[in-house]
């Protein structure tokens, strides 16, 4: 799977979790860029991403993400 394909799927996950069809994420996207991205929605997002890609993150990985690009890097390593 290419980085672009991961982003296509991630955009759908983000749109569903945050109920906003206009969301487009990039490597530099952070929680500050999405209005409703708080700690609870972060958990919902991680669970949705894990389901979408059939992978599991550990807590250390989840806590270390600085932006969406780091999440994508880890997704690409796992799939």
Image (cartoon, helix red, strand yellow):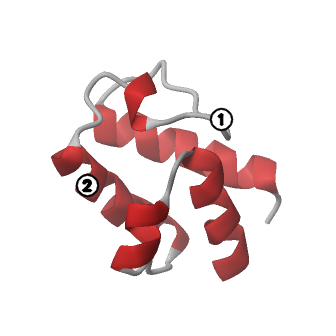
Q: Name the residue nearer the viewer: 70 or 12.
A: 70
Q: Name the residue nearer the viewer: 51 or 73.
A: 73
In the picture shown, does residue 29 fall above or below 3?
above
Q: x and y percent of residue 59 in the render?
A: 34, 76
Q: x and y percent of residue 25 in the render?
A: 58, 33
Q: Which residue is mark 1?
A: 26
Q: Which residue is mark 2?
A: 44
Q: Is residue 19 visible?
A: yes
In the picture shown, does residue 11 fall above or below 42?
above
Q: Residue at x 46, y 63 (%)?
A: 64
Q: Is residue 79 visible?
A: no
The quarter of the rendered structure image containing the N terminus is bottom right
Q: Residue at x 32, y 65 (%)?
A: 47
Q: x and y percent of residue 73 in the render?
A: 69, 63
Which residue extends farthest left?
A: 40
Secondary element at image label 1: loop
Q: Residue at x 71, y 69 (%)?
A: 76
């Amino acid at each position: 799977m290419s980085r672009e394909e991961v982003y296509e799927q991630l955009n759908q996950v983000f749109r569903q979790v945050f109920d906003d069809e206009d969301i487009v994420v990039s490597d530099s996207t952070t929680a500050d860029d999405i209005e409703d991205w708080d700690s609870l929605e972060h958990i919902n997002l991680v669970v949705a991403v894990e389901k979408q890609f059939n992978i599991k993150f550990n807590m250390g990985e989840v806590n270390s993400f600085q932006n969406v690009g780091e999440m994508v890097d880890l997704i690409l390593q796992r799939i």
